[in-house]
Amino acid sequence: MSTLTIRRPDDWHLHLRDGAALHAVLPFTAAQFARAIVMPNLKPPVATTAQALAYRQRILEALPGGVRFEPLMTLYLTDRTDPAEVDRAKASRLVHGFKLYPAGATTHSDAGVTDIGKVGAVLARMAELGVILQVHGEVTDPAVDVFDREARFIGEVLVPVVEKFPQLRVVFEHITTRLAAEFVRRARPGVAATITPQHLLMNRNALFTGGIRPHHYCLPVLKTEPDRCALLEAVASGNPRFFLGTDSAPHARHTKEAACGCAGIFSAHAAIELYAEAFEAAGALGKLQGFASEHGATFYGLPYNEGTITLTKESWDVPATYRFGSEELVPLRAGERMPWRIAQSGNTNERR
Ligand code: DOR
Ligand code: ZN
């Protein structure tokens, strides 16, 4: 197959940051995706509906002229989140979920939840109103091996939450393991997962190929080859519980190439092309449209996008860096060749 046309896709897990960083990265996502769930881990976090609506406005103002893109907002859950905030979020119609960051699990998660027992009343209200819980699924106990944190989270937190709140709709974000894919496949209705391009295309060896590779470091960290294969099988199966979430997470070059480098992989410059490569390798290009453009919308109760995006099998070279405000950003596959490219993306008003 040398061209592939699918319905316009959405990114159900994205970090856009704010200010100059937002201006630098937003055009990449808006060139490919019609909508994206925008993660709330700013400093300070986006923890109220009012803050989310103001952030949404800043995103809309940062869009290049004539580009259509809809930011879908989510709130940062804290130990102190008021259950009434769930009502305000729902009433806004612009906030679609709450993100659970276990405190200390990842970038800007220090304001996160220290004990899941502290947010029981909020989760109960979310279940009642049909507001979605998005979960960063890793335990934070420093005694637990970093490669085991997702597996431990499933047993210790996710299974009890899913059982205690049977109506709660849950997205297990950026799953990385065979165990997580298996859990989602077998879970009760109302449980789904996003999968990133890096976890479909790389295993943990990519962190150490020829030396330490900070631009392949993200959280949850890359896992084993059998885990990667299990994720590929999950997406190739066409199961609607699995959908696209890039977790594209830009950090300035010097903060990654450092003695203590930040977690996060920037993939927005080539997101749909990276997924096409993974699906092609799995012999499942026919399943890309469901994963990228349909399953997430169905889970979130939103309409499918109109229009299409067309990819062609035509190589292009990823730049070594992109501008990131006054800094530089090193994208995934920097300086390497990509086999698929976008021929038409239908993202501008003029094209409709
Ligand atoms: O690698 C990551 N980067 N994982 C996360 O959970 C957060 C993200 C970020 O915000 O940089
Ligand atoms: Zn993320």
Image (spheres, helix red, strand yellow):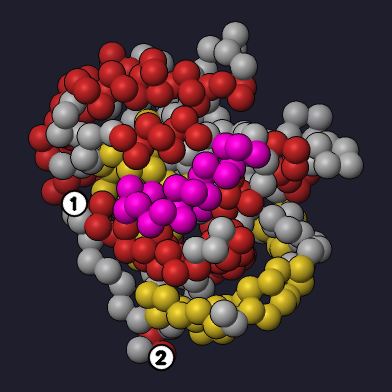
Which residue is painted at 41% across and 90% down in the image?
351
Span shown in magenta: 225-249
Mark 2 Cα shell of 10 Å, populated few (<14), some (14-19), many (≥20): few
Relative to the observer, which residue lies in front, 242 or 42?
242
Q: Which residue is mark 2?
A: 350
Which residue is painted at 72% across and 63% down in the image?
322
Give how far across and how far down residue 48 sits, in percent. Answer: 29, 39
Relative to the observer, which residue lies in front, 122 or 142?
142
> Which amino acid does the dot numbered 1 rest on?
Ser
- Foreground tag (1 vs 2): 2
Instruction: Residue 288: name its quadrant.
Output: bottom left
Give how far across and how far down residue 257 sits, in percent. Answer: 80, 40
Give how far across and how far down residue 21 sits, in percent. Answer: 59, 55
- Apparent side of residue 274 relative to residue 169 in the rendered image (left or right): right
Give the residue at the far left of this rendering. 128
- Apparent side of residue 113 relative to residue 299 in the rendered image (left or right): right
Mark 1 Cα shell of 10 Å, populated few (<14), some (14-19), many (≥20): some
Q: Which residue is mark 1?
A: 92
- Apparent side of residue 227 relative to residue 70 in the rendered image (left or right): right
